[in-house]
Image (cartoon, rainbow, N blue to C red):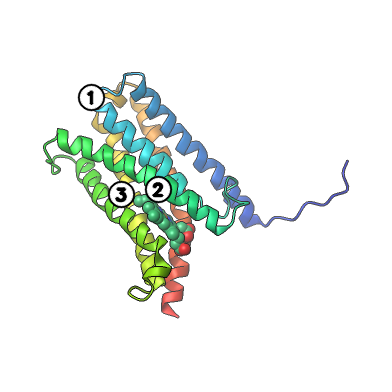
Amino acid sequence: MSDEKSKPTSVLQHIEAVLYVINQLCIGFVTIWVSWTCLRNDLSGIRLHAWLVTFGFVFLMAEGMMCFYDGSWLTLRYSRKYKTFFHVALQILGGGMGVAGCLVQLIRDDWSVSVTIHARLGFAAFILCLISLLSGLAAFLARSLSPTIPPLINKTFHVVISFAAFVIAMMAQFYGFTQTRIFKSQGQDFVILMQVATMVLMVITSIGAMKSLYQKFGSLAS
Ligand code: HEM
């Protein structure tokens, strides 16, 4: 046995690690199941929309937000600079897929968004995601834009709008599971399980964003 003593970890770090594992399980579960359901049917009909938004919003966007999370094992050893690099790459890809998925369906539905709660939320997520991508670019260029926009305001705006985009996208996902036959055919219990997994991943993924906002509003107030 080695005499080496490992660095003690706090209770909070343990809780963060547990939440991280639960979150990865939920993200993986929803992404794999939706991908399996849609890809085995050649992304026909509504499946192209369902797969694009799930892969973009649930997988890539959530993972992009988790890059900065303190308990993230995948990015723990990287500096803030590298975490930002992973974040930008995942969000451009995830946001792009999410926006493309919404666009596909909006065109198919002739831009009629007032029919269901899912459609309304999806449209809101589409608009917010576009603003969020642009605000992300501004946050990335915060130093160069500092003569016009103070970096703290710039970054706070990005986190607020991105947080809203993510939560609304997850709510749209929640209602989406009951909206189409492709998921209902798997059984009511399974649909409820997917909805619960979606809500759990939404809450855990939001922790990092809420912490960031708490710090930013604290700095703005002082
Ligand atoms: C639409 C997808 C996006 C979402 C949901 C999103 C979400 C977030 C969140 C929640 C944070 C705060 C992280 C934390 O401190 O814990 C953040 C920070 C950041 N994001 Fe994004 N983001 C998105 C797209 C982008 C893009 C496209 C870029 C760059 C082109 C970008 C650049 C940044 C930068 C530079 C920060 C660090 C800000 C700071 O130092 O406080 N983001 N983003």
Hey, what amino acid is under mark 3? Ile
Q: CA distance from mark 3 to mark 1?
A: 24 Å
User: CB atoms at circles 3 and 1 under 8 Å apart?
Assistant: no
Q: Secondary structure at mark 2?
A: helix
Between discs 3 and 1, the one toward the N terminus = 1
User: Can residue 71 be seen?
Assistant: yes
Which mark is on residue 45?
Answer: 1
Mark 2 and mark 3 lie on one chain; the one further toward the N terminus is 2
Q: Is residue 90 above or below residue 79?
A: above
Q: Earlier in the sequence, mark 1 or mark 2?
A: 1
Q: Which residue is mark 3?
A: 168
In the image as oriented, which residue stretches furthest toward the front?
Answer: 144
Residue 17, relative to residue 156: is it above or below? above
- Asked if one can make out residue 69 in the rendered structure from this viewpoint, the answer is no
What is the crowding at mark 3: few (fewer than 14 residues within 10 Å), some, or many (at least 20)?
many
Name the mark nearer the viewer: 2 or 3. 2
The verdict on label 2 being within 8 Å of ligand 1 is yes
Residue named by callout 2? 91
Task: From the viewer's perspective, tell me whether residue 168 is left or right of residue 19.
Answer: left
Q: Nearer the viewer, residue 194 or 221?
A: 221
